């Protein structure tokens, strides 16, 4: 049942590509029994696959579409420290968030996460109670970061700043009546989809079979039938433990799970629309005590502004749309703090993601807990659901612990608190890289290998769109599991966030797939 060449000269530890996928399908066709089957290739599913594989268990990860196809590519690209949860009294989630943020920044993915300054402007019309409350919140966040321990040195303490510095960090702010600002720091991901790919590749380096374009059509606690979405062939997998990590689609495989998905929308703006800010801008949502709209500067000259928190009242789509009313809401809230209001004409892209929140009864989706849960169905299927991107690792650890206990598997202890992802390296090693800084922030210690994909062809090092080069497109195909142009443009590089960029880069993406 050969589907592509039996080997690939481009293989390196943790490489994912069409040839490796074909080998995995062939091997599983002959020996279809594994310790753990994980269904779902987002941050939770890939985190679970890595946790299980690094404990010495045999693992299959099956994803109907592509890595990071669903919610995991539509986040704010922030590794939150849990400040908003302190405001609601949920100290447990806040502490867990601060701890997990620290692990990502200091141990597991320091190449993908950096400290992001965030400024909250204080105008004369800002209520004194509001200003005092947010300042107290930032101080509590500082204390929480220190108590959580991990990565405490990576983020400076919050402080009050002058009006002049506030404007220097966020030049588009309304200067009239500006009294100053409150400066705090959080973690920012280079790219959420890149984190998912790094998790999947690290799991593969520990022996996991990573099967994209393989959907689960039948599932119970000991077996599943997978369908190869490319060939239409079916593959039966016998597993000692089956874990459902399909996020907002989890209830389709575990009908007893009750979810209330909520929609988070972002708009993409050119940095020039906000005066090329060097800090994220934080603007309170009117009438809300702990909700804000953020304008988050990116390394590619763009700003992502978000986000909404609206209940989804329709069937869950594969790719959610960003409604016009969400876009208007975001522009309106941001404009309250700006010298010149933002307009629809300045929006160059938009995206929306769906949070897989557990249904706990009444109340707004914005007020539902972000706690994760690990649930076991009567069929034996374990479902990991809820939570958020920052705490994926803790969620994965809990899910694998549950699977080991249920199936009586012989496995080592969890290793992921200290397990670097592919590309991770010390700041000194990353700084010494001869590769361009933009590549180092995206590929870490592999940046020089990405350059080598050019193979002495200078044209491959020229940007095709949004600063992305042909060498990166080729790397995505040879090492990151991209199987079609959409994988390359919409998840491995994120060129597709702006339609004009996507159209410009499409021929180069197709050419990379032919190499």
Image (cartoon, rainbow, N blue to C red):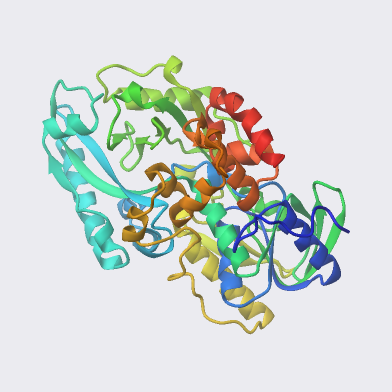
Frontmost residue, 205 versus 154: 205
Q: Residue at x 15, y 20 (%)?
A: 176
The image quarter containing residue 308 is: top left
State whether residue 144 appears in this view. no
Q: Quadrant of the N terminus?
A: bottom right
In front of the other: 403 or 233: 233
Q: Is residue 175 left or right of residue 197?
A: left
Spot occupied by residue 102 in the image (x, y as percentages of width and height): 35, 61
- Residue 232 percent across, percent down from the top left: 86, 48
For the residue pair 375 and 408, the one nearer the viewer reads as: 408
Task: Using the rendered view, name the quadrant where residue 177 is placed.
Answer: top left
Q: In the displayed structure, would residue 322 be above or below residue 227? A: above
- Place of residue 422 in the rendered image (x, y in percent of width and height, measured from the top left): 50, 60
Q: Nearer the viewer, residue 501 or 195?
A: 501
Residue visible at 18% across and 29% down?
167
| Badge count | 0
Say which quadrant the C terminus sits in: top right
């Amino acid at each position: 049942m050969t589907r592509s060449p039996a080997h690939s000269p481009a293989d390196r530890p943790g490489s994912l590509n069409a040839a490796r996928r074909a080998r995995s399908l062939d091997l599983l066709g002959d020996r279809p029994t594994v310790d753990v089957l994980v269904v779902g290739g987002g941050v939770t599913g890939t985190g679970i696959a890595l946790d299980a594989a690094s404990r010495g268990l045999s693992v299959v990860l099956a994803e109907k579409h592509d890595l990071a196809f669903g919610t995991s590519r539509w986040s704010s690209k922030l590794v939150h420290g849990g400040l908003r949860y302190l405001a609601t009294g949920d100290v447990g989630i806040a502490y867990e968030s601060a701890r997990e943020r620290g692990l990502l920044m200091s141990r597991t993915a320091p190449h993908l996460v950096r400290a992001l300054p965030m400024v909250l402007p204080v105008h004369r019309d800002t209520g004194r109670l509001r200003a005092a409350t947010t300042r107290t919140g930032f101080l509590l966040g500082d204390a929480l970061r220190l108590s959580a321990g991990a990565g405490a040195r990576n983020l400076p303490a919050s402080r009050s700043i002058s009006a002049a510095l506030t404007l220097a960090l966020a030049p588009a702010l309304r200067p009239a009546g500006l009294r100053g600002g409150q400066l705090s720091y959080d973690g920012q991901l280079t790219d959420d989809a890149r984190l998912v790919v790094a998790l999947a590749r690290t799991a593969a380096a520990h022996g996991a079979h990573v099967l994209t374009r393989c959907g689960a059509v039948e599932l119970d606690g000991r077996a599943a039938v997978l369908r190869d979405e490319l060939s239409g062939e079916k593959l039966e997998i016998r597993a000692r433990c089956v874990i459902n990590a399909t996020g907002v689609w989890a209830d389709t495989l575990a009908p007893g799970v009750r979810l209330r998905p909520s929609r988070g929308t972002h708009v993409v703006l050119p940095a020039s629309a906000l005066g090329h800010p060097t800090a994220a801008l934080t603007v309170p949502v009117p009438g809300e005590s702990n909700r804000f709209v953020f304008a988050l500067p990116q390394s590619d000259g763009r700003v992502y502004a978000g986000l909404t928190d609206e209940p989804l009242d329709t069937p869950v789509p594969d790719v959610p749309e960003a409604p016009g009313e969400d876009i208007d809401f975001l522009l309106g809230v941001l404009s309250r703090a700006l010298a010149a209001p933002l307009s629809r004409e300045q929006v160059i892209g938009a995206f929306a993601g769906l949070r897989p929140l557990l249904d706990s009864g009444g109340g707004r989706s914005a007020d539902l807990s972000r706690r994760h849960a690990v649930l076991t169905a009567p069929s034996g299927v374990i479902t990991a659901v809820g939570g958020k991107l920052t705490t994926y690792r803790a969620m994965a650890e809990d899910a694998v612990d549950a699977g080991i206990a249920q199936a009586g598997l012989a496995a080592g202890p969890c290793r992921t608190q200290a397990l670097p992802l592919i590309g991770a390296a010390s700041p000194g090693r990353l700084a010494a890289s001869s590769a361009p800084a933009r590549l180092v922030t995206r590929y870490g210690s592999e940046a020089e290998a990405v350059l080598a994909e050019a193979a002495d062809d200078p044209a491959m090092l020229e940007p095709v769109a949004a600063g992305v080069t042909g060498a990166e497109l080729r790397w995505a195909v040879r090492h990151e599991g991209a199987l079609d142009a959409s994988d390359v443009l919409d998840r491995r590089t994120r060129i597709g966030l702006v339609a004009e960029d996507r159209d410009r880069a499409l021929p180069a993406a197709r050419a990379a797939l032919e190499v």
